[in-house]
Amino acid sequence: MATGTQKAIFLGPDGEVSIKEVSQDYKPTGNQALVKVKYSAINPADLRHSYMGLHGSVAGYEWAGTAIEVGDSSPFTVGQDLFGMVEVAANKPQYLGAHQNLLVADGTQHTWALPKGLSPEVAVGMPVAVQTVADALFNAFGFGFPEANISGSDAANTAILIWGGASSVGAAAIQIAKTVGFNPIFTTASKHNHASLEKLGAMQCFDYRSPEVVQEIKAAVAKSGKKLRVVFDAVSANIPVLGTVVPEGAISTAELGRQSCSEDVPEKDLLLCGVLPVPTDPTWKFCLGVRNYGDKLEALGGMAQDPEFPVRMNKFIVWLVANHEKHWQQALRITKVKGAEEGVRQIRRVFGGGASMEKVLIERPL
């Protein structure tokens, strides 16, 4: 059992992150493990979730570290290297927060043993992106992946547009879409990122800044001989929800994505999903980076969910971790920062959209 206090990055009800001294009197029970954190990764949700009422706790979701104590029924062992993410919930206990030196990994749904050949620096950035994409492809869209025992429609040779391919989620989506069988894969990004995204599996990239980007995508789709009805918005930009400030006259990525679909595809056949809800267009679904087991989403006030959704997400990430050498590559530049003060600054930068093809990690100790 750890005792005393530790430095942590705290998310307040005002939507601000700050540095606090918090208790570290953590004792793992049951299937839990007390983890000495080596790295935590920064995500836009570290700040954005305050707008969902998910605040008043230690910030951060993704972590990698070593088990230093385990509960009496834990599947993990002392000294074992682990990685994972903490549960998303309102009023969550203090030990569930990645941006601190010690945390408690709460069970096995969101904690995985670090396999041979996967470094903690790479593993720490996988959970949120991979599970977000899995929620979109396998739950929102209903595609299957027999290799991971996930039932559903066959994605083979289905065209897909991934808006925001240079984001953490977007880069993951390109790789996973390729693994699942989507073809062709189209994506948008800044021009200087196109070559990197094509290496990941994108057939063609488009400059999202181009005033003709929708027409360019439509022309490429027509040339491919396919119909575009599947769009995954990995950035959900310019949508006025959860603290997003939309510049006057800006067009949302959701609207641009929908406009890019083949015109002769009936609305009922469109499959559209983004990382944020689109209040003005019910055709769009939104996906999550984590779902608790059960038929109610604790993070969204008990909203009903299909209890199979979190099971399908977990099946895929377990499969991907086991097969990472063939099906996962570190696409984003890793930036390591030291100290809680710099961590706070980087959390604000990432939330503001300042990270492109980049994953920011906070080293320990804080």
Image (cartoon, rainbow, N blue to C red):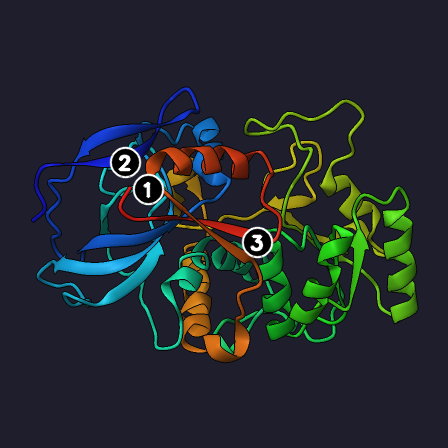
Q: Quadrant of residue 317?
A: bottom left
Q: Give left or right: position of 267 versus 140.
A: right
Disc 3 to disc 2, C-alpha distance: 26 Å
* Residue furthest top as drawn: 14
Q: Which residue is mark 2?
A: 8
Disc marking residue 169: 3
| Identity, as a three-letter code, of the amino acid under mark 2 | Ala
Snapshot quadrant of residue 83: bottom left
Q: Is residue 78 visible?
A: yes
Count of all numbered marks drawn on residues in the image: 3
Q: Position of residue 256 (x, y in %)?
A: 79, 43
Q: Amino acid at mark 3?
A: Val
Q: Secondary structure at mark 3?
A: helix
Q: How would you rate the neighbour count of disc 2 (Cα within 10 Å): few for under 14, some for 14-19, many for 20 or more?
A: many
Give how far across and how far down residue 347 sits, in percent. 46, 37
Q: Earlier in the sequence, mark 3 or mark 2?
A: 2
Which disc, if any, is residue 99? 1
Query: In whole angstroms, how far apart are the C-alphas of marks 2 and 1?
Result: 6 Å
Q: Is residue 294 visible?
A: no
Look at the numbered discs 2 and 1 and tell me whether their residues touch, using CB distance below 8 Å.
yes
* Amino acid at circle 1: His
Q: Nearer the viewer, residue 207 or 13?
A: 207
Residue lying furthest front in this view?
338
Q: Is residue 19 above or below residue 171?
A: above
Q: Residue at x 24, y 57 (%)?
A: 107
Give how far apart the Cα atoms at labels 3 and 1 are: 20 Å
Q: In the rendered image, which quarter contains the C terminus? A: top left
